[in-house]
Amino acid sequence: MTAAPRRWTGLTYVLPLVVFLAALFLVPLVRLLRLSFNPVDTFNAALPGFTLTQYGRVFTEPYFYGSLLQTLATALLVAVLCVLLAYPAAYFLARRRAGVLRTLLFVVVISPLLTSVVVRTYGWVVLLSGNGVVNKALVASGLRDQPAQFLTSYPAVVIAVTHVLLPFAIIPLTTALGGQDRNLHRASQTLGAGPIRTFLRVTVPLSLPGVVTGALIVFALAMGIYITPLLVGGVTQPLTGIRVYDQVTTVFDYPVAAALSFALLALTIVSTTLLAGVFRIWERRLHG
């Protein structure tokens, strides 16, 4: 068989996937982009035509661009928290020898991904509610005279989102730490470096690809998450996902919701690209 028929055979295998992605992703995305340029009437119904008014509102009204900035700050905070919390767990998993305990720990880490994010979020609603476990413990210990208002607060949103996205940081970090050559650690200690210096000068630099991967995945997911902030923090949280939800379900202004969605998409792509560049520079400096 010549090279040309083989190439066409390979394209035939890929064609169903391309058609599937185009039908279920690209086509709706293009239609949504077209909707973002439609004008609206006094009842916020989309009209035929082309206008930049919706994007003008997104980037000039504090209600919209403020949510973009708050979403960016929240995603960065959640990414940092996830990496910091994931590193000890990943380090412990990577250092454990294959066995029942290591398998059990992996199951514990992966099991949240097999559970609906709505179920996990409602778990935090139960914990942080006025008569939940956290408030009962605070009142019983005497730290508070009455239950605190944890729900509908920004810290509760950060905690819940960090919990939901934490496995996405643990998995790549465990892979990066588990793939390190143990001889490098032994060589470092043979040359006089103690455990702490070996960890900072050998383990951390070699695990940087896992740190970068986990941080970028968590950051991208945190930029678009909305169901967890909505259930834990309510519609008053100034996050873009909730603003889009509000425009669709309450205001019924679909063109503005579409424009805000694409503004969030553009911000996510630009921010992820910049973060990847910063991480790449950092990695080059660490490795000389």
Image (cartoon, grey):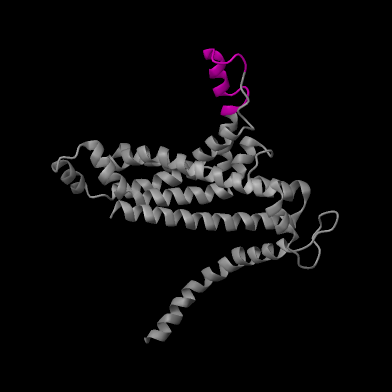
On screen, 226 above or below 152? below
Residue 258 sits in which quadrant? bottom right
Residue 49 sits in which quadrant? bottom right
Q: Quadrant of the N terminus?
A: bottom left
Asked if residue 172 can be seen in this view, the reply is: no
State left or right for residue 270 relative to residue 32: left
Residue at image x 60%, y 44%? Answer: 70
Residue at image x 22%, y 37%? Answer: 195
On screen, 130 above or below 249? above
Residue 196 sits in which quadrant? top left
Q: Position of residue 273 (x, y in %)?
A: 48, 58
State left or right for residue 237 relative to residue 18: right
Q: Quadrant of the C terminus?
A: bottom left
Q: Position of residue 69 (x, y in %)?
A: 60, 47
Q: Position of residue 55 (x, y in %)?
A: 70, 58
For this rendering, which residue is in front, 240 or 23?
240
Residue at image x 19%, y 40%? Answer: 193
Asked if residue 270 can be seen in this view, the reply is: yes
Report if residue 5 lies within the magenta region: no
Q: Give the magenta range.
A: 127-146
Residue at image x 77%, y 51%? Answer: 252
For this rendering, which residue is in front, 245 or 103?
245
State left or right for residue 151 relative to residue 60: left
State left or right for residue 180 relative to residue 217: left
Of all residues, the one furthest to the left in this rendering is 190
